[in-house]
Amino acid sequence: LVLGRLVERKGVGDVVTALAQLPGVELTIAGGPSWDALAADPEVCRLRDLARRTGIADRVRFLGRVSHADVPRLIRASDVVVAVPWYEPFGIVPVEAMANGRPVVGTAVGGLLDTVVPGETGELVPPRRPYLLARVLQRLLADPARCRRYGEAGYRRAAATYRWEQVAAATEAVYESVLSRSQQPTTEAIR
């Protein structure tokens, strides 16, 4: 499953290219424009053309924009969630995947370096390396026990680290720290 905005920098083309190396594997792409606008979307057209050229158009399914309420069901219906942007400040998709007990294959960039723990909750690959991505996906999909372990560990990590209450408390602590430092007199203020 690939989930999220459909823009080139999200690396979905790399996933489509990788899929050509994985016989029998199907890809669901959820996100982008609404279902009725898919045919006119330039990125969807580019990805469909890539799938046709690589001979896998019959194994790639575009859902278009999905409601937030449908995201957990889609994630749980997948074996692996793939998030391979070229850069990403944080990336909520890996956290959503882990919160739903699914392993993540992501790129070793930005926020994904903090969320995905290689060998524990999923795997990380360099961006723009579809053939390496294919090898990592092949190994993971061939090992259901590892997928299960990664999914369980991801669920525990998401519950321990990314619950809204914890994120809010950590954010509040940062603000309090900054405010307390700004309220202390400095030599500039004393002069």
Image (tube, rainbow, N blue to C red):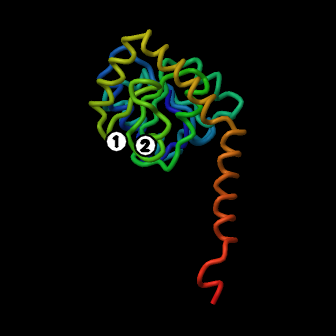
The amino acid sitting under disc 2 is: Pro
Left or right of residue 103: residue 127: left
Residue that sits furthest to the bottom in the current view: 191
Task: Name which residue lies at 68% across and 64% down.
Answer: 180
Task: Name which residue lies at 64% across and 63% down.
Answer: 178
Please state the horizontal and vertical placement of residue 181, each as a whole percent of the image.
64, 67
Residue occupied by mark 1: 127
The amino acid sitting under disc 1 is: Pro
The quarter holding residue 74 reads top right
Residue occupied by mark 2: 85
Left or right of residue 39: residue 165: right
Cβ–Cβ under 8 Å for marks 2 and 1:
yes
- The answer to whether 79 is drawn above or below residue 68 in the figure is above
Between 8 and 34, which is closer to the camera in this rendering?
Answer: 8
> What element does badge 2 sit on?
loop
User: For mark 1, does the 10 Å Cα neighbourhood hold few (<14), some (14 to 19), or many (20 or more) residues?
Assistant: many
Please state the horizontal and vertical placement of residue 106, each as a whole percent of the image.
42, 34
Between 127 and 149, which is closer to the camera in this rendering?
Answer: 149
